[in-house]
Amino acid sequence: MRPEGVLLLFLCAAGLAGPGAAGPVQVRPRGPAARPIRVTFDELPPGPYTRAAAAAQWKGLRWFELAERGRIVAGQKNLAQRFLEVKYPAGKFGPDVNGGQFLVSIPPREEWYLDYFVCFLPGFDFRLGGKLPGLTGNGALSTGGHNHPGEAWSARYMWHRGGAIIVYLYHMDQKGKYGDSLPLEGCRFTPGRWHRLTQRVRVNTGTDRNGVIQVWFDLKKVVDRTDLRLRAAPKAPVDSFYFSTFHGGNTPDWSPHNDGFARFDDFLITADEREALSPARRPPE
């Protein structure tokens, strides 16, 4: 067989050429088709946000632990709007009794954007801190003080005292047991106001330090890291959305002094930066 025939057989086996292919080899895009995932709550009736409702909205739902603390509520100015409202009971901490969590598998890719809106209701006690949703690789494996370097990573957010914000990052080179903090410098949550969080995660190649995490707070870029080792490729692409929100920490001093509530709306997971950062995506009323 001629050398060019051997090459064609190789390309066909790799999925890069087919019988009768001519011209330049067309390399497939990395990862599956990047169809956006968008979840709003306007079509749901007010009442408990059940596992069945979540499974209908999130096609890749793996597990669901919101109990009675997640509800669908109507907007105050626009009664046709619906939001997911989460309760954080006084004196409680941790996701079993405060806030709640669920995990969604998404098509594995090297890069996704996550964009959503959150509003802490007036009187919210931020206390020492708590968690907010973010993207992860290999589900929730690297969270809660359990890190699996190279095998998994997570990039949830946390609020801290007074509403300060960080990316709470588990990765290959974290310094401590409980991950590292990437501060959103100069940013704070204001109770009673809707805020927009936009996150870009691109995993590193091999074990190179070229993983990317960028964050926009109300469309202003406030985190820009391009030197991270999130995983040992090809393991742990961006493959999951972790809805995770609760006070904690793991000691009682993280517990709020009063019942608190936060509302979430319009989750978008997309590979398109223009879509993720579109000014047409307006905060709820």
Image: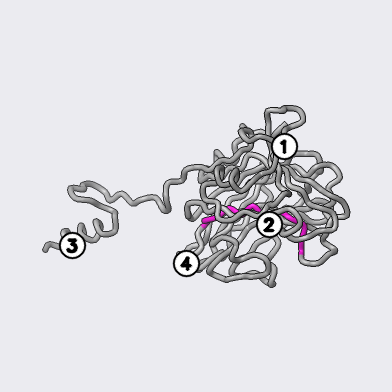
- Numbered disc 3: secondary structure: helix
Residue behind mark 3: 6
Residue type, mark 2 in image: Val
Cβ–Cβ under 8 Å for marks 2 and 4: no
Q: Residue at x 78, y 44 (%)?
A: 120
Residue 247 included in the magenta stretch of the image: yes
Between residue 283 and residue 226, name the one nearer to us: 283
- Residue 278: percent from the left, percent from the top? 59, 36
Alpha carbons under labels 4 and 1: distance apart: 45 Å
Q: Indicate the quadrant where residue 201 lies.
A: bottom right
Alpha carbons under labels 3 and 2: distance apart: 49 Å
- Numbered disc 2: secondary structure: strand
Most prominent secondary structure in the magenta stretch? strand
Residue type, mark 1 in image: Val
Magenta residues span: 238-249
**Comparing marks 4 and 1, which lies closer to the viewer?**
1
The reply to whether residue 165 is in sight is yes
If the image is split into quadrants, where does the C terminus sit? top right
- Residue 49: percent from the left, percent from the top? 66, 44
Residue 167 tag number? 2
Residue type, mark 3 in image: Val
Q: Residue at x 69, y 65 (%)?
A: 180
